[in-house]
Image (cartoon, rainbow, N blue to C red):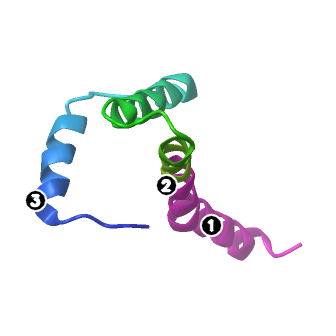
Amino acid sequence: MPYISQDKREKYRDKLLTISKIETKGELEYCIFLLMKIYMLDKEYKYSNLHDTVYAAQHCADEFRRRYLDIREDTAIETNGDI
């Protein structure tokens, strides 16, 4: 997953953290979709830009799965035994 410089992280983190709480899956999906739309605002409506937008969301999902869901699954295996 691409990482950005600390100064750019702060710029986005400060703005995104003004959201107090995302309570439902639907709200999370809305926020992700809105970010994708914002990204596309100044981009040409062509396949490569649209694909990049979808790929970025998928790449983030993959990274989240690697960092959180996979660890949770490993913990469950340790706790309950493997299949």
Residue drawn where x is 49% and y is 55% of the image: 60
Mark 2 touches mark 1? (CB < 8 Å): no
Magenta span includes 59: yes
Residue drawn where x is 52% and y is 30% of the image: 29
* 1 or 3: mark nearer the eye: 3
Determine whether 60 is above or below 76 in the image: above
Label 3 – label 2 distance at C-alpha: 20 Å
Q: Which numbered disc, 2 or 1, marks the residue that appears first in the sequence?
A: 2
Task: Identify the residue position indicated by label 1 in the image.
Answer: 70
Spot the residue most to the right: 83
Question: Helix or strand or loop: what does disc 2 sit on?
Answer: helix
* 2 or 1: mark nearer the eye: 2
Q: Which numbered disc, 1 or 3, marks the residue that appears first in the sequence?
A: 3
Q: Position of residue 6 (x, y in %)?
A: 14, 64
Of residue 41 and residue 82, the one placed in the foreground of this image is 41
Q: Where is residue 80 in the image (x, y as percent from the top left)?
A: 77, 69
Magenta span includes 33: no
Task: Identify the residue position indicated by label 3 in the image.
Answer: 7
Mark 3 touches mark 2? (CB < 8 Å): no
Task: Identify the residue position indicated by label 2 in the image.
Answer: 60
In the image, taking residue 6 as reference, residue 57 lies left or right, namely right
Question: Helix or strand or loop: what does disc 1 sit on?
Answer: helix
Of residue 11 and residue 38, the one placed in the foreground of this image is 38
In the image, taking residue 42 as reference, residue 8 lies left or right, namely left
**Badge 2 amino acid:** Cys
Residue drawn where x is 61% and y is 63% of the image: 72
Label 2 – label 1 distance at C-alpha: 14 Å
**Badge 3 amino acid:** Asp
Residue drawn where x is 69% and y is 66% of the image: 76
Q: Which numbered disc, 3 or 2, marks the residue that appears first in the sequence?
A: 3
**Numbered range of the magenta stretch:** 57-83
Where, quadrant-wise, is the C terminus in this rendering? bottom right
